[in-house]
Image (cartoon, grey):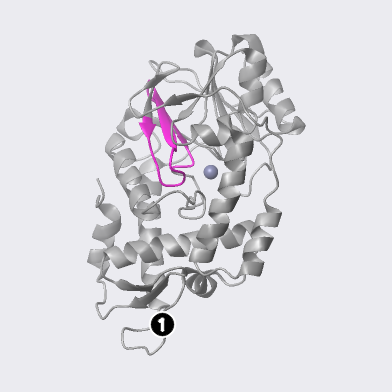
Amino acid sequence: MTAARDGEGSADGPLVERIGHDGASPEGSNSTYVLPERGLVVDPGPPGERAWETLTAGLRAVGLPLEGVETVAVTHWHADHAGSAPRLADEADAELYLHADDAPLVGQYAEARRERLDRDARRLREWGVPRTTVDAITAADEPSPMPPECPVRSVADGDEVGGGEVLHTPGHTSGHLALAVGDALFLGDAVLPTYTPNVGGSDTRTENALGTYLDTLDRLADHVDGDGAEAGGLRPYPGHGPSVDLPARIEAIRSHHADRIRNAVATLPGPDSPDHGATPWAVARDLFGEMREIHAKMGAGEAAAHLAFAADLGLAERVGSAPDRYLRTAREPSDEELARAVGESRYR
Ligand SMILES: [Zn+2]
């Protein structure tokens, strides 16, 4: 059990403390942020006893006793962020907030999980994932130790939570939110310091997952014109790890997606090919190699999201559905065209 502390605050911004959950996620140490003066906790972290020990020891260390917690804000429904939120809200007698689109996945956890498993399996088959692989993905999806139901308050873009403002930042999940409190911006998994957040597989409800996510990057970029971790006067706090250079990461993630669109299209059969196109799963296998369980779901979703986006750009053509099949078109994208496509809003 560790409770890493690196509290900071600017002259006029709120004091922000971080509790790090070691080894809780393949994306790196999950970050719980605590604003002791406001009784606010953002992303309490994973479920289970060990994480609960880390969370409560961390709260004691930063001088916020359980009974002082008034507001629990969760950036998105994934268990490594939301898992301890119901217990924290219950034991602290605090209000728990999620964006309306993600609220049911925590508030009606058991029922929403059953629906999600059905939806995930259906989507995976649409993406051309073989039935045995789909069954293995479903079997590997362990239930989280979370209550089947709990009270959650649904919020929308622009709403106030814990004295801060909710920004709807969909893409990684449909109801992902960022929270701006004074000059602190809590990002969840919208932008991460090292990984590129998954789009497509991380929430199978999201249509136009890549376009939606790129719009979110545009929106976050609008908040931070300038360089460095304190660009635009904001201090960004990512959902994994302690800090992120937001403008630099937004640029890196955009160019990552431009490369991935180009690479995904390059694996497709050409327009004159006699075969019936390639499924997102076939493209994912070409791009990522052998994948199992959660990685198979994330990989197939990534490929599907990039192919759908490429089709909107006229670089690929969808020639079949259930399973989806794509061919390359005759048009070669220029670097400039791809940079524009990932750097400018197309769905707003
Ligand atoms: Zn996540």
Queried whether the magenta region covers residue 174, the answer comes back as yes
In which image quadrant can residue 290 be found? bottom right
Question: Which one is nearer the viewer's eye here, 63 or 314?
Answer: 314
- 321 versus 185 height, above or below: below
Give the residue at mark 1.
Answer: 276
Q: Hey, what amino acid is under mark 1? A: His
Q: Callout 1 environment at 10 Å: few (<14), some (14 to 19), or many (20+)? A: few
Question: Which one is nearer the viewer's eye here, 347 or 220?
Answer: 347
Looking at the image, which residue is at 48% across and 73% down? 283
- State whether residue 65 appears in this view: no
Q: Look at the image and give the residue range highlighted in magenta.
A: 167-190
Looking at the image, which residue is at 33% across and 78% down? 328
Looking at the image, which residue is at 46% across and 65% down? 303
- State whether residue 223 appears in this view: yes
- 297 versus 59 height, above or below: below
Looking at the image, which residue is at 32% across and 66% down? 310
286 relative position to 140: left or right? left
Residue 185 at what x, y percent from top left? 41, 30
Quadrant where the image shows the C terminus = top left
Residue 340 at what x, y percent from top left? 24, 58
Mark 1 CB near ligand 1 (8 Å cut): no
Mark 1 lies on a secondary structure that is loop
Question: Which one is nearer the viewer's eye here, 194 or 163?
Answer: 163
